[in-house]
Amino acid sequence: MAKSRFEYVKKFELPDPLMPNTYIIVRIDGKGFHKFSDVHSFDKPNDVRALDLMDTAAKTVLNEYKDVVMAFGESDEYSFLLRRTTTLYNRRRSKINSSIVSLFTSAYVFHWARFFPNTPLLYPPSFDGRVILYPNIEEVRDYFSWRQADTHINNLYNTTFWALVHGGLTTAEANKTLQGTNSKDKNEILFTKFGINYNTLPEMFRKGSVCVRSLSVEEPQKSFPEQQAAHGIMTLSIGPSSSGNSNTVLSRKEKVYQGTEGSPMVLHVDIIKDLFWSERPWLLS
């Protein structure tokens, strides 16, 4: 950048580094998506096309930023977890937040026609973003448990609400019917009035979407122990050379998997219980 007498204005740019050695979560949320979903005729209560589009945008973020090791999405929201030791953009809050939310938004627009081929995009969607820091594993797990619990609560309400509306009630009448009800009441309404067993609905709706990278390595030998991958260790065995020298010494190299390699994949699983995390220790390492 050329020097000039105007360069003093750079002093007004305040540094905004995030606290080191903390977990970074960036949560993005659709702005005005109630209107957006109505204008673009989303299916209610859940539009698989819209959810798949959100998942695709999230995978775009994981493909671009290797230090984003996990993401969780529901409805018009997605949360991205960055490695505790990340130095992305020197941990500058504004750069991390703006880069992730802008990439997600552009990917959403870029892939729109793939999921809505017969629905033109009538105006640009937008997402806001925020950055949260958590010092310990417990808080990170509780954060994602909170978001998945919220997914269930919102989906149960929306499923019951739209069942009532499709059944003939107005939106005002459906809202009034559900006032003061708990989960048991909503399940009872769904089953007795509409024959819907909530627990048999797609897990995508009930549990949200979890985006992580798959652990895939080329296996030189078929005896590669899968249980080591489950514990975050990729062990590659290098066998004898083609010369057939019996004195060749076998060597083993171990590499701790960090969750930054491999292709992003979307799961619809329980992330409140321990199993998901114990199978992927690298997420919180």
Image (tube, rainbow, N blue to C red):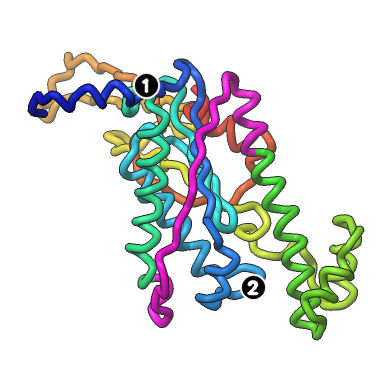
Horizontal and vertical percent position of residue 36: 53, 68
Q: Amino acid at mark 1?
A: Pro
On the image, which quarter does residue 240 sit in? top left
On the image, which quarter does residue 171 sit in? bottom right
Please say if 211 is above or below 94: below
Q: Residue at x 54, y 45 (%)?
A: 72
The residue segment tinted magenta is: 115-144
- Horizontal relation, residue 273 to residue 164: left or right: left
Residue placed most toward the observer, 70 or 143:
143
- Horizontal relation, residue 204 to residue 201: left or right: left
Q: Label 1: state its secondary structure.
A: loop
Q: Which residue is mark 1?
A: 15
Q: Amino acid at mark 2?
A: Lys
- Horizontal relation, residue 95 to residue 10: left or right: right
Q: Does 134 appear in magenta?
A: yes
Horizontal and vertical percent position of residue 256: 39, 22
- Horizontal relation, residue 104 to residue 201: left or right: left
Residue placed most toward the observer, 187 or 213:
187
Q: Residue at x 80, y 76 (%)?
A: 164
Q: Residue at x 59, y 20 (%)?
A: 136
State the CA–CA distance, disc 1 to disc 2: 44 Å
